[in-house]
Image: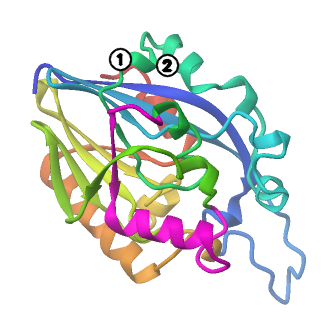
Amino acid sequence: MSDISVTLVDRGRVHADRNYVVDGYAMADAENPNPDHEIVEFVVWNAVVDHPEATILWDTGSHPDAGDGYWPKPLYDAFEHVDAGEHRLEDDLNDVGYSLDDVDAVVTSHLHLDHAGGLRQFAGTDVPVYVHEDELKFAYYSAKTTEGSIAYLASDFDHDLNWEVVHRHRRTLVDGVELLHLPGHTPGVLGAKVDLPDDETLLVAGDECYVDANYAEEVPLGPGLLWSERDWFESLQTLKELERRHDAAVLYGHDRERFESLVGRW
């Protein structure tokens, strides 16, 4: 598709223990009962897919008040979005040449608090917000009961939004942009296959793979970030088959080096 471009939008940095994202990274044993833990800097990003039919925003990042009490303290202590207040959605979009008014559709890869914190900007509008059926159900179940996952905040997504619910494993959003259901991290993670100029293909893995070790070495996310390891592995193989078939570039959910290597490419 010669008329599709993808602009990656830097939404700041999260500091967290690598063990959360690479299962068993620092494990104690008899010879080393107290292994050192590594705090790593992860990226939070969004993307703008510019297509002749629509300008599509991929995710909306963290709420700017994440570090000022908006995120629950245990979550912020574990995943410290150190500069969320410096990365308001409208400002970061402006920095790459877009505005909120340019957005024709939003894809929510999943509804965790570092991906859905800007959805309120689209409340009361007719901008469709794409989300997988399984994700929407699990997010409300988690946020409105004491079960599920603590990484969902109702205040992020419980708004008057124009939900466009994805029910199947694959859905064409516009010609050249296909949504992929990649359960594992959560029940309803969405990725995408994007056909780009010069026969290039981008696979958006999102939080199916936080970092390269999850993809290249097939090391699962840590248990606290994994809804289903079996589903996660199946989703990983789906991505790898698509990568082989299309010689695709793969964009992970929070890998800073991979993100920086792809900024400006398309």
- Colouring of the image: rainbow
Question: Circle 2: is it few (<14), some (14-19), or many (20+) Cα within 10 Å?
Answer: many
Identify the residue at image location x=41%, y=47%: 108
Q: Nearer the viewer, residue 76 or 22?
A: 76
State the mark number for residue 79: none
Alpha carbon distance from label 2 to label 1: 10 Å
The relative height of residue 70 versus residue 181 in the rendered view (above or below) is above
- State left or right for residue 104 relative to residue 23: left
- State left or right for residue 191 relative to residue 32: left
Q: Secondary structure at mark 1?
A: helix
Q: Quadrant of the N terminus?
A: top left
* x then y, percent, for residue 96: 46, 14
Question: Circle 1: is it few (<14), some (14-19), or many (20+) Cα within 10 Å?
Answer: some
Under mark 2, the amino acid is: Leu
* x then y, percent, for residue 158: 54, 52
State the mark number for residue 102: 1
Residue 148 in the magenta stretch? The answer is: yes
- State left or right for residue 181 relative to residue 161: left
Q: Secondary structure at mark 2?
A: helix
Q: Quadrant of the C terminus?
A: top left
Residue 55 in the magenta stretch? The answer is: no
Residue 222 shows in this picture: no
Which residues fall within the magenta stretch? 123-151
State the mark number for residue 93: 2
Mark 2–mark 1 contact, CB under 8 Å? yes
Q: Nearer the viewer, residue 81 or 125?
A: 125
Q: Quadrant of residue 217?
A: bottom left
Identify the residue at image location x=53%, y=73%: 141
The relative height of residue 72 versus residue 90 in the rendered view (above or below) is below
